[in-house]
Image (tube, helix red, strand yellow):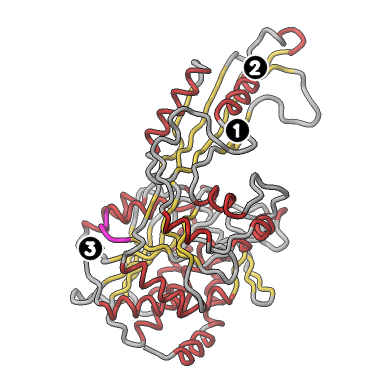
Amino acid sequence: MRNTADLRRSITGLRSDYESRLAELVDIASVSVEPERKSEVLRCADLAADYMRDVGGTVQIAKTKGYPMVVGKLGADPALPTVSVYNHLDVQPADPSEWKTSPFKFSRKGERYFGRGTTDDKGPALAALLGARLAVADGAPINIQFLWENEEEIGSPNFEQGLSVLARGKKGFATDSVAVSDTIWISKGRPALPVGLRGLCGLTVKLSTGAKDVHSGTTGGAARNPLTELAALVAECVDARTGKIKIPGFYDDVKPLSAREQKSIAQAGFSRGTFMAAHELKSVRFSQDTELCRAIMARPTFEVHGLTGGYRGPGIKTIVPARGELKLSMRLVPDQDPRTIFKKVRAFILQRIPDAVVEAEGLMQPFLGDLDGRELQAASRAVKETFGRPPAMVREGGSIGAVLTMRKLLRAPVVLMGLSLPEHGYHAPNENFDWTQAKGGIEMFYRYFWDLARSGARR
């Protein structure tokens, strides 16, 4: 293993390689939700496979019922521990009119890289890959596998099926642990290792009260208005001011933060001002940093994503709409079960609007890791040695379906080792990444791989 000075010189020497590879990936609009981008998603997978071959790995493009996964392996010695690194290469859509630069054309301004996918998740994926290349070149006694998905942004609908096939295949896919580099720090300069993710219960509520839109002058006051009823339903479900959910039994299974977690979150360096600036928010629900932080990390949510129906043109059109649709989701925390929550919410809705049609649109379990796990401790050491301070052990507000699938099918612990910052703009216009986080990520993964290799951690 190299000393710190040599290691950092070597990483600095990789900068042009890192930037050119990231530019190639970002210039491919691998938007999995848009069918017309299919060829680009497949091209991105092929390019990723080439990158793995370039670092000396064996590669398999594993087919699924949807988009393929790219599997790379550096080493296959059964006597050595094996670590697998998960990232995804598909990206969110982007409206060019909202961007200062072209979203699918890589650009650089100083230390910062702009383009869709730079931080979510192509930039972190390349950092992990180059960290592995250095570790293997220096003789780290460990097998390193890569699992790069291309459907994460649409909920990983075929990931479980694809991973099951991989695990049963002749080549096999077994591991002693998994590292996921797809999470966000609390703030710049304050590294964080999330030990939890929120789950998800998404649903739609559809209401039809007539065969066609009708004139409000001749029917208004007598005809049912589906938009009015759906808006009233939302008010019955959640307190708009506090976010408190009013559905009976919703909080029954919420696992409270332990004293240890509360202490770690309090020391995480969360700032209301920084949070608002990073996400360009004009106001938030809570004035205290701790309260706001817990709302994101440790409490369930009820969000309205859309209320559609009726006239949508300029001005008004005085009709009573025939149909309306409400798009909702709830982020869930340990130990809430999304199926149980869906049943409670559905029952609550149908008590109020019996002829509504309530359909599930994605159910995902929450995740909670092991604070005392040896892999998490190794990750903590790697972060501290790289960035100069121990990481905050926090929970993250988002959801990653592949995490639960890997823990279940691979029967291995999962550690979340993200590199993104709030200001990098996950899913937002002008998404970006920067060299400071990239080079830190290369070093962090290099140290992490060596730490696991030295411990000989086998399951």
- For image coordinates 32% across by 53% down, the residue present is 162
Q: Position of residue 75 (x, y in %)?
A: 28, 77
Measure the C-alpha gap from mark 1 to mark 3.
50 Å
Q: Could you say whether the residue bearing mark 1 is in a helix, strand or loop?
A: loop
Residue type, label 2? Asn
- The residue to which callout 1 is attached is 239
- Foreground: 152 or 201? 201
Question: In the rendered structure, are the residues bearing label 1 and label 2 in contact, judged by CB atoms less than 8 Å apart?
Answer: no
- The residue to which callout 2 is attached is 225
What segment carries the magenta color?
409-413
Residue type, label 1? Asp
Q: Is residue 80 left or right of residue 250?
A: left
- Foreground: 65 or 419? 419
The quarter of the rendered structure image containing the C terminus is bottom left
Which mark is in front, 1 or 2?
Answer: 1
Q: Is residue 316 left or right of residue 146?
A: right
Q: Is residue 191 above or below residue 241?
A: below
- For image coordinates 49% across by 55% down, the residue present is 396
Q: Is residue 104 at all visible to an observer of this figure?
A: no
Which mark is in front, 1 or 3?
Answer: 1
- The residue to which callout 3 is attached is 172
Check if residue 220 falls in the magenta segment: no
Residue type, label 3? Gly
Q: Position of residue 131 (x, y in %)?
A: 43, 78
Check if residue 412 falls in the magenta segment: yes
Neighbours of disc 1 within 10 Å: few (<14), some (14-19), many (20+): few
Q: Could you say whether the residue bearing mark 3 is in a helix, strand or loop?
A: loop
- Give the prevailing secondary structure in the magenta stretch: loop
Q: Is residue 275 left or right of residue 371?
A: right
Q: Is residue 111 above or below residue 392?
A: below
Q: Position of residue 192 (x, y in %)?
A: 49, 65
Q: Is residue 204 above or below residue 91?
A: above
